[in-house]
Amino acid sequence: MAVAPRAQPTDFFSADEWAAISARSSWRGLWCVAHCWAVIGAAMLVGARWPATIPLAIVMIGTRQLGLFVLMHDGAHALLHRDRRVNDWVANWLCSCTLKAYRPYHLQHHRFVQQSEDPDLVLSAPFPITRASFARKVLRDLSGQTFAKQRFGHVRDRLRTRSAGESATVLLFQELAKDRRFLIGNVLGFALFAAAGVGWVWLTMWLLPMMTWLPLVARVRNIAEHALVRENEADPLRQARTTHANTIERALVAPYWVNYHGEHHLFTSVPCWNLARAHRLLARRRVTERMETECGYVALLGRACAA
């Protein structure tokens, strides 16, 4: 297996600069998580008070649901908090319950990024695609089909492959048990909102964003990070992409500095809130001119969907 070539921080930063941008914080990660939930809560309150704003709330909440995953991703690198136990608890219980399974998979992605053994290579390999193909993917995302496949596709597949002597009911419950934390959490969430007389808020402004906008922005994120990047790329500066995001893109597509993916792959021990600072330091030394970058998400999608 060919491990992806690595960049050395000492080649780009002074000792003081590296110490500053790679330092873990006992409060910044917690603040980001609190901010994410606060935005979700505020969007729900506004949507409940003024129902005409619900479409915007769906977009805002779906993006912050991606934000929770982004912060869990930082937790997978042990960057959310100085104390590893606090880091893992916050990432797993306040961001995403997938931390335990995600961490080894994701670290494998970093070890072999854009190499033939990269487990995420399948996400970027098909590009460029046609606009018609991308439109079909968007339709599947916004209609909930992508969510259903990703969340419960294993149930359908297991039932399809069951042998003649296997009980469909038993298999159904066995497969659903794999998603028990997701199911239990959402049942309890709906029950609490319903007890307060606003069960519809949970359905329209938690589950609906998760089923529609979240799959779409997650897809855009995946495209932006590695699509059109050459397979088996030897230059660490070009194994992942940084996409320059304006204020609207950061609010609706790229929360918590996720657009600085090139910097993240170069320096995995830099917390997300310091990635922009790392980018500025690299730009000052004109290193960014050699990196894989894009001027915005619209431009990037235009290139990725132009086959």
Image (tube, rainbow, N blue to C red):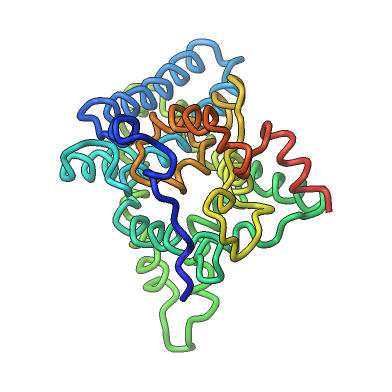
Residue at the location (35% across, 34% down)?
Answer: 14
Residue at the location (65% across, 52% down)?
Answer: 227
Q: Quadrant of residue 104?
A: bottom left
Which quadrant would the C terminus be assigned to in this image? bottom right
Residue at the location (28% across, 34% down)?
Answer: 19
Residue 145 x, y percent position in the rendering:
62, 51
Residue 49 x, y percent position in the rendering:
49, 11
Question: Given the current orientation, which residue lies at the most extreme top position?
Answer: 49
Name the one closer to the observer, 185 or 218: 218
Residue 237 x, y percent position in the rendering:
55, 48
In the image, taking residue 102 as reference, residue 245 lies left or right, namely right
Residue 127 shows in this picture: yes
Residue 125 x, y percent position in the rendering:
66, 62
> Number of callouts in the render?
0
Q: Quadrant of residue 116?
A: bottom right
In the image, taking residue 86 as reference, residue 245 lies left or right, namely right
Name the one closer to the observer, 294 or 36: 294
Residue at the location (52% across, 63% down)?
Answer: 153
Residue 190 shows in this picture: no
Name the one closer to the observer, 148 or 251: 251
In the image, taking residue 250 as reference, residue 21 lies left or right, namely left
Name the one closer to the observer, 93 or 5: 5
In the image, taking residue 254 as reference, residue 42 lies left or right, namely left
